[in-house]
Image (cartoon, grey):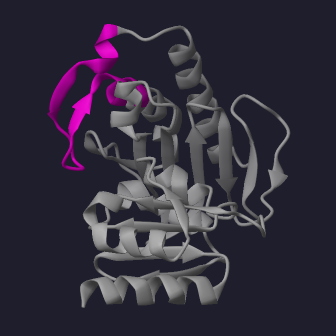
Amino acid sequence: MTPFVQAAAKAAEKIADRLNEGWLADYGRHYEIGAGGDRSAGIDKMAESLYVEALSGFGMIDSEESGIIGAGEARIILDPIDGSDNALSGLPYFGSSIALESHGTVKEAVVANLANGDLFYKSGGPLMRGRIGGERFVPVVRRKRATVGIFERAYGYPGLARRLLESGMKFRSPGAVALSLAYAHYVDFVIFAGPRRSYDFAAALWMCEGLEMIETESLLIVAKERDKVELLQRLALQDEG
């Protein structure tokens, strides 16, 4: 691990430890609208403070909650809690997304699943997976026989959702896109419908390097095989027509 990845992983461990101590009423308290356009919650603020403390020495932080924090040549794109609504509702699918960008290009990235303890990082080599607080990390290996895909914000494309079902494609819509993209090497496909924000995508989309991908203004499709992304695109275009 590089120093940046180590610092991000240590902060994720501190956040996970706090959450494991029990849910505090303040985590559910709502604050002002954050830089990303959503209303910040106490859990977002708690996680942001720990990441800022750990990462401020690596560059300027651009956080979904507070916007620009500090200064520096490098830019750290931070979503302290990806899937905040899941966290607030007690659904175990939420985490953190952290990307270190230099001259407009992501160089290092960490995505932590605070609900189940998975931690992914990439810093020039292969995408690695281990456990929050753990020491053993191994390269992510694609699963060839995945039977379930992920369709984030499926409610925004009911026609495409119906066509997927009619085509026999199973999918879930768990509500934390950075996590879903981090798992893209495992699942059958990942689809995201709607406008995209860098806070949600900077780290995990870079982790999808080597996978097949199609991007339009309103749709992102990621899969392991070209035939699959092209099939999904055709289904989406049928829906639009």
Of residues 107 and 187, the one drawn nearer to the viewer in this rendering: 187
Rendered position, 211 above or below 102 = below
Q: With 26 as the anchor, is 77 left or right in this view?
A: right
Which quarter of the picture shows residue 239? bottom left
Of residues 214 and 109, the one drawn nearer to the viewer in this rendering: 214
Residue 63: horizontal and vertical position, in percent?
34, 45
Q: Is residue 41 magenta?
A: yes
Q: Is residue 73 visible?
A: no
Residue at (63% x, 32% y) in the render: 116
Residue at (34% x, 43% y) in the render: 70
Of residues 113 and 36, the one drawn nearer to the viewer in this rendering: 113
| Mark count | 0
In the displayed image of the protein, which residue is found farthest to the left?
32
Q: With 3 as the anchor, is 48 left or right in this view?
A: left
Q: With 147 as the anchor, is 69 left or right in this view?
A: left
In the displayed image of the protein, which residue is found farthest to the front?
166
Rendered position, 240 above or below 164 = below
Q: Is residue 71 magenta?
A: no
Query: Where does the magenta region start and end?
Result: 25-47
Residue at (51% x, 77% y) in the render: 167
Residue 5: horizontal and vertical position, in percent?
65, 45
Q: With 3 as the anchor, is 106 left or right in this view?
A: left
Residue 120: horizontal and vertical position, in percent?
67, 49
Residue at (37% x, 70% y) in the render: 162
Residue 137: horizontal and vertical position, in percent?
82, 45
Rendered position, 109 above or below 44 = below
Q: Is residue 240 visible?
A: yes
